[in-house]
C-alpha cells in the first residue's frame, strides 16, 4: 500500500466572481522514501494541493475525491482528527519561514511544541529534544540559541528551524513548499541536501514543490507538471526531462536561461497570461496560449495519454508535438545537468 494515495482530487473555492476550481481531478501516489516533485507557474494549483493534503484549506473550500494517508481517508475528516495528524504523521515546510514562525515565541518553544502535544513529553524532555533537532539541522550553538527569537536568525537558519519543527515527531509525510525561496544558491544547496539526507535517514515520503526545474531534477524521482489546476504531464523525472511532450512543459523548459546563451539574447516566453480560475477555457486549460491549438482543443478536456510506461501527457496533439520538437534533452544530457 502506498504511503499516500490521491485520487480524483478537486477543490472548489468561492470567489466574489463565483465558484472557481483551483484543482481538478488530480491523482498520484507516493511511497515511503520517495520524492515527488510538483512544478508549474504560480496559480497552477501546486500549493493548494499541498494545503488540501494538510487539511488547511479555507473554510469555503469544497473538496471531493480521495486522500488516503497510510490507508486512512482524510477527505471529510474533522478538524480534531486533522490536528492529531498534523505535526505528527504529516508536516509541512512553508516557503516563507518568517510567516511560519511566531515572532513572539522563542524558537526552542516552537520546536518543542509538537513534542509536547503529540508525544506528551515534559517541558524539560521536549527542550532536550528541541536542542538535538536544532543541532541536527545545523543551527550552531543550539543549546545556547534555543532561547533566541526568529528575528535573531538569518533567512537560511530560520528555514532550518522550520524544518526542525516539521521533523520533530518523525512524520511519515513531509511537504516542502518552495523551501529555498529567497535564499542564496549556497544556502539553497545546503537546505536541499539537509532535506534529502533527512528523508533518506527517516524513510519519509517527500512532496517537493518548486518553480526551479533544476531543484526538481536533482531531488525528485517522479514529477507532476500542473497547469490550470490539472496535472498536464507526469512521469519519472528522467523520462519527463528527456522526452517532455506537453506544450506547457516544453514552454517551461524553453523559458530557462542557458549557460551558453549569447549576451543580450532574449529569453523565450510562453505567450499570453495565466487565466484566472473562474475564466479557464472549457477544454484544455492551455488552449490559446499553445502554438498547437486547434478547434478541438477548446471542446473537451483531453484525457492523459501514455507517452511511455508511466509517462502521461494531457494533449490531443502529441503527434504534432513530437514531429515539431527540436533537439530534445537526452538522458545523458539530463545526467550532465544534474552533476
Image (cartoon, rainbow, N blue to C red):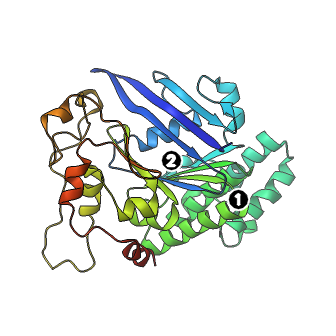
Q: Nearer the viewer, residue 253 or 196?
A: 253
Where residue 194 appears, as percent x and y from the top left, is 61, 67
Separation of residues labelled 1 and 2 (CA atoms)? 19 Å
Element type at mark 1 = loop
Q: Nearer the viewer, residue 197 or 244?
A: 244
Of mark 1 and mark 2, the one earlier in the sequence is 2
Q: Which is more foreground, mark 1 or mark 2?
A: 2
Element type at mark 2 = helix
Where, quadrant-wise, is the N terminus in this rendering? top right
Answer with left or right where residue 169 lies relative to residue 23.
right
Residue 276's image quarter? top left
Eyeballing the image, is 311 above or below 7?
below
Answer with left or right where residue 190 lies relative to residue 323.
right
Mark 1–mark 2 contact, CB under 8 Å? no
- Mark 1, residues whose alpha carbon is within 10 Å: few (<14), some, or many (≥20)? few
Q: Which residue is mark 1?
A: 147
Answer with left or right where residue 16 lies relative to residue 152.
left
Eyeballing the image, is 242 above or below 57?
below
Eyeballing the image, is 240 above or below 41?
below
Q: Which label was assigned to residue 211?
A: none
Residue 257's image quarter? bottom left
Where residue 244 appears, as percent x and y from the top left, is 33, 58
Q: Residue at x 52, y 65 (%)?
A: 156
Q: Nearer the viewer, residue 27 or 47?
A: 27
Residue 106 visible here: no
Q: How many marks?
A: 2
Residue 306 visible here: yes
Q: Which residue is mark 2?
A: 99
Q: Residue at x 43, y 72 (%)?
A: 185
Q: Residue at x 86, y 53 (%)?
A: 125
Amino acid at each position: 500500500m502506498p504511503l499516500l494515495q490521491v485520487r480524483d482530487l478537486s477543490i472548489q473555492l468561492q470567489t466574489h466572481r463565483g465558484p472557481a476550481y483551483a484543482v481538478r481531478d488530480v491523482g498520484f501516489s507516493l511511497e515511503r522514501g520517495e520524492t515527488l516533485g510538483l512544478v508549474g507557474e504560480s496559480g497552477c494549483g501546486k500549493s493548494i494541493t499541498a494545503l488540501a493534503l494538510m487539511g488547511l484549506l479555507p473554510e469555503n473550500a469544497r473538496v471531493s475525491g480521495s486522500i488516503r494517508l497510510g490507508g486512512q481517508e482524510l477527505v471529510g475528516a474533522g478538524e480534531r482528527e486533522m490536528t492529531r495528524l498534523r505535526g505528527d504523521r504529516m508536516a509541512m515546510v512553508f516557503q516563507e519561514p518568517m510567516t511560519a514562525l511566531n515572532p513572539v515565541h522563542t524558537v526552542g518553544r516552537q520546536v518543542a511544541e509538537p513534542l509536547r502535544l503529540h508525544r506528551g513529553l515534559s517541558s524539560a524532555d521536549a527542550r532536550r529534544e528541541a536542542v538535538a533537532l536544532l543541532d541536527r539541522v545545523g543551527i550552531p550553538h543550539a543549546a545556547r540559541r534555543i532561547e533566541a527569537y526568529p528575528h535573531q536568525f538569518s533567512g537560511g537558519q530560520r528555514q532550518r528551524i522550520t524544518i526542525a519543527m516539521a521533523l520533530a515527531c518523525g512524520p511519515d509525510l513531509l511537504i516542502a513548499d518552495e523551501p529555498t525561496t529567497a535564499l542564496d544558491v549556497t544556502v539553497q544547496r545546503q537546505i536541499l541536501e539537509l532535506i534529502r539526507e533527512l528523508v533518506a535517514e527517516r524513510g519519509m515520503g517527500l512532496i517537493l514543490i518548486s518553480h526551479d526545474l533544476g531543484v526538481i531534477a536533482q531531488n525528485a524521482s517522479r514529477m507532476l507538471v500542473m497547469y490550470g489546476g490539472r496535472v498536464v504531464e507526469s512521469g519519472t523525472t528522467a523520462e519527463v526531462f528527456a522526452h517532455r511532450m506537453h506544450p506547457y512543459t516544453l514552454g517551461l523548459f524553453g523559458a530557462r536561461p542557458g549557460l551558453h546563451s549569447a549576451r543580450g539574447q532574449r529569453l523565450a516566453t510562453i505567450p499570453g497570461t495565466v487565466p484566472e480560475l473562474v475564466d479557464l477555457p472549457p477544454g484544455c486549460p492551455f488552449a490559446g496560449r499553445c502554438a498547437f491549438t486547434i478547434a478541438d482543443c477548446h471542446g473537451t478536456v483531453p484525457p492523459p495519454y501514455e507517452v511511455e510506461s508511466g509517462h502521461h501527457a494531457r494533449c490531443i496533439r502529441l503527434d504534432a508535438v513530437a514531429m515539431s520538437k527540436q533537439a530534445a534533452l537526452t538522458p545523458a544530457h539530463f545526467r550532465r545537468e544534474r552533476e
